[in-house]
Amino acid sequence: MSRAMELIVAGYVKVRDRCALTELLAHRREMLAQLQAVSGVTTENAVIAIQEEVVLIEAGLEELAPPRGSLPDDEWNTRRGEGD
């Protein structure tokens, strides 16, 4: 996994920038979808790297999750962009 991505996520978590993490996650998921759609070229290493970054970003978002019970689950998911 990229040390740079670890530092980026840690920085966003430190400043509690959930919006930036959500945007970063959406970008990485789009990159992953595009890589998986490529044919004729081996993208296995890139796919693995992006999947690892997605896991890292999701962990960062979980660190910013409000304490259990402070928000209804559906409100937290909507704020994270998952309730659509």
Image: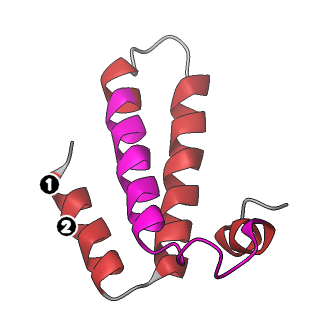
The residue identified by callout 2 is 7
Q: Position of residue 20 (x, y in %)?
A: 48, 77
Q: Residues within 10 Å of mark 2 (few under 14, many from 20)?
A: few
Q: Which residues are magenta?
A: 48-73
Residue 69 position (above or below residue 49)? below
Q: Main secondary structure of the magenta part?
A: helix
Residue 29 position (above or below residue 40)? below
Q: Secondary structure at mark 2?
A: helix
Q: Position of residue 49 (x, y in %)?
A: 32, 36
Residue 71 falls inside the magenta stretch: yes
The residue identified by callout 1 is 3
Residue 58 falls inside the magenta stretch: yes
Give me the residue at 77% from left, 75% from top. 75
Q: Answer with left or right where residue 79 lies relative to residue 48.
A: right
Q: Secondary structure at mark 1?
A: helix
Q: Residues within 10 Å of mark 1 (few under 14, many from 20)?
A: few
- Give, as a three-letter code, the residue at label 2: Leu
Give me the residue at 34% from left, 39% from top. 52
Q: Answer with left or right where residue 14 lies relative to residue 33.
A: left
Q: Nearer the viewer, residue 22 or 31?
A: 22
Asked if labels 2 and 1 touch by Cβ distance under 8 angstroms, the answer is: yes
Give me the residue at 50% from left, 78% from top. 18
Q: Answer with left or right where residue 9 lies relative to residue 69.
A: left
Q: Nearer the viewer, residue 70 or 45?
A: 70
Q: State the separation of the CA atoms marked 1 and 2.
A: 6 Å
Q: Position of residue 24 (x, y in %)?
A: 48, 64
Determine which of the numbered discs, if any, sits on residue 78 in the image: none
Say how many tags the image has: 2
The N terminus sits in image quarter: top left
